[in-house]
Structure formats: C-alpha cells, structure tokens
Image (spheres, coloured by chain):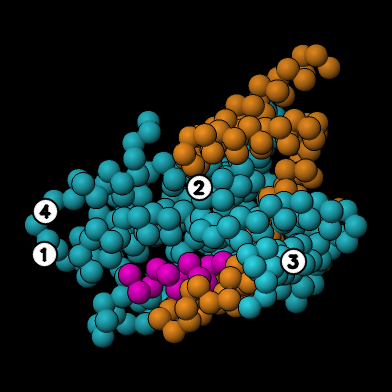
Amino acid sequence: MSGDVMMDTWWWPYVMILVAGWLATDVWRWIGVFASGRLREDSELLIWVRCVATALVAGLISKLILFPQGILGETPMWLRIAAACAGFGAFFLSRQKVIVGVLAAEAFLIGGWWLVDRVG
Amino acid sequence: MTVPEGTEQSNLPEDPPKSGREWFLLGARAAISIPALILTAAFVGFAGLARETGLSLAETLAMTGFIWALPSIVVLTGALSSGMGLIPASIAVALASVRLMPMTMALMPMVKVPGKTKNWHLLIASHFVAVTAWVFAMRTLPELPREARLPYFTGFGSAVTSFVFCMTGIAYLAVERLPDVVAGALVLLTPVYFLCSLWGAARLNVDKAAMVVGLVLGPLFFLYLPGLDLLWTGLIGGTVTFFGMKIFRGGLS
C-alpha cells in the first residue's frame, strides 16, 4: 500500500515533511518559548492537552507493537506483546532505567523468535 | 557500562569563568551517553521503518533533521504511507508533538538569563527539545552556572542531532543487508523505548492513566476507524481520562 499514492510528484513528500512535519512540530516548541513564564504548567488546560498527547503517543506505541511494518510483522503477535511486557517489567524493576527495559524486550524478542523458528 | 549519565558534570573543572563556546563544546562532549545511544538505535530502527514504508533517503533525513521528535516522525511516516492529506497529517503530527510545548515551557526559564538572552537564541535551542535531551537537561543544567546552560544545552542538542542524523543515513543505506532478526529487533526498539520513556516522563497519575487508555484504544481505533485513528485515540482517550480522573479524585470542582 505504500509508495504509489505519495509518489505522485517528487516534491509532495517534502511539502508534507516541511508543513505537516517541521511546522506542526516546531510550532509547539516556539509557543513553549513564548509562553514560558506566562502559562502555568499545572493549569487544567495544559493537563488536558497533555492527556490527549500522551494517549495519542501511547496509541501509536501499541499500534507499532501490534501491527508493525516490515519483517517484524511476520513474528507472532503474542511474542511482540510478551517482549514489550517483559521490557516494561524490567524497566519497572530496575527503578525505571530505560536501557534495562529496552535490552530486556530485545532479548526476549530475539530469544523467542529463535525458539519459534526452531519449533515451527 | 551503566555509567550514570550524570558523570559528565562531575568531570567539569571547577574554575567557572568560561566562554560560551567552551560550554558549547562541553555540552557536545556530554552527548556521548547511554540515552543518546538508545536514541541513536531507535533512529536506526526508524531508518528501517522508513525504508520498508518506501521513503527515500533524502526524505528520511529531512524528517530526522527538521522534525527531531521520534513520535511525530513515526506519525508522519504513517501519514505518508497511507496517502493522508496535508491537513489531517498536520493535525495528527501536531497532536503527537503537543507534549513538546509544556516540556519547552519547563526548560526555558532554566536556560534563560533574564534580560540578556535573546529570544531567537531560545527559538533555535528549542528545536532540540525532545524526550532525550529534555530529560538530560532537566537533570544536568541546574548544577551549572546560569550563563553556561544555554550554550551547554545547545552543544548537547546539536551533537546528538548531528550524530543521530549521520547514523540514520548510514543505517538507511545499510539496513537492506541487515539479517532479519536484527532488522526486526530494531523496529521493536522504538515502541519499547517510547513505552519506557513516556512512562518515565509522566509526572502525574493522570498522565499515566492517559497512557494506559491510549495503549488500549490505539489498536481498537486502528481496526474500526482507520485513517484518523490516532487523532481519535488522543482526543477521546485523553478527554475521557482527564474527566474520569477528575471524577475519581472527588467530583468536578
């Protein structure tokens, strides 16, 4: 499904990257610069905004784990979910060290992948 | 290998009068750190994703340099691959990067020298605000003299960005030759890295609740409302969490 639609013209992806990517991202950083000191960080509006943003990024995370692109999509879904859970568990047990979580998830995935290949 | 990332500041010599340039270089040196390596690996994973999706090398690098926030980059990659229009894609990316605003707001008073720092300096430095650099800055900068903070942060940010930029390009070119397991493992790196660092960056319970709700709703909306699924996940999940937690905490006041 990739490729055809967006490759209609060579420059369209760059318009997307500059407007929907760069502008849509940096505008928040610029607003942050100008608003610093004026908007309170614990205001209700900002908490709501952060809830929406957090839920969106979290939705993206689980989408990437459940429906990944490319070669990872060929692994069983339960293995990817279990690997992510193992990573998060290790992250939690290690007093929130991101590196531990990442390594645990990767070790689980690679080990499980190897086992599935051998058994299947 | 578990060198605490804070080690750098103890290496800083004690004599304070230093030029901005020296602080910039010290910040750049501090970029050699564990979080920067995880970030690099996550971007290597993105290079693989971008290639699988059909993006060119130039597009991949343009996204890395111009956006510099992995969730937004991944959202835009999805938008490009599904042929989403400019407006919906902008909204989706903007929603994915709203969190940069409170992060920038929290950081700026720390790096600003009141009455002296020019706004355009802050605007340039703000481009480096992303989870990795922000966590580093919030932990490290308070121990530095005020004048040192902006050049130090800018040095750190530009060093990490340049390094990751180059590695993304190299990874894009090399990724075809990677064994399946390595390529797959790198694609998993990004969501797991986000999973952990998003939880680590959540300060209030309501942030954590929103994260759990988003994790559940994301795949549901993807299956039943594909296209704008991330927008709905954010808006509905975030709003429900926000009001749900308000009621849970003891009524709407």
Amino acid type at mark 2: Leu
**Kind of residue at badge 4:** Glu
Q: Is residue A36 above or below residue B149?
A: below
Q: Nearer the viewer, residue A94 or B65?
A: A94
**Marks 1 and 2, how far apart in space?**
32 Å
Kind of residue indicated by mark 3: Val
For label 1, the residue is: B17
Residue A30's place in the image compared with B8, above or below, is below
Q: Which mark is residue B39?
A: 2
- Percent position (x, y) of residue B47? 62, 47
Marks 1/4 in contact by CB < 8 Å: the verdict is: no
In this rendering, which labeled residue sits more in front, label 3 or label 2?
3
Q: Position of residue B200 (x, y in %)?
A: 51, 50
Residue at the far front in the pictured view: B250
On whether residue A23 falls in the magenta region, the answer is no
Label 3 belongs to which residue?
A: B240
Q: Amino acid at mark 1?
A: Pro
- Tell me whether circle 1 and circle 2 mark residues in contact (CB < 8 Å): no
- Label 3 or label 2, whichever comes before in sequence order: 2
User: Can residue B139 be seen from the camera position used here?
Assistant: yes
- How packed is label 1: few (under 14 Cα within 10 Å), some, or many (20 or more)? few
**Magenta part of the chain:** B99-110
Q: Determine whether the residue tagged by mark 2 lies in a helix, strand or loop.
A: helix
Judging from the image, mark 4 belongs to the subunit labelled B
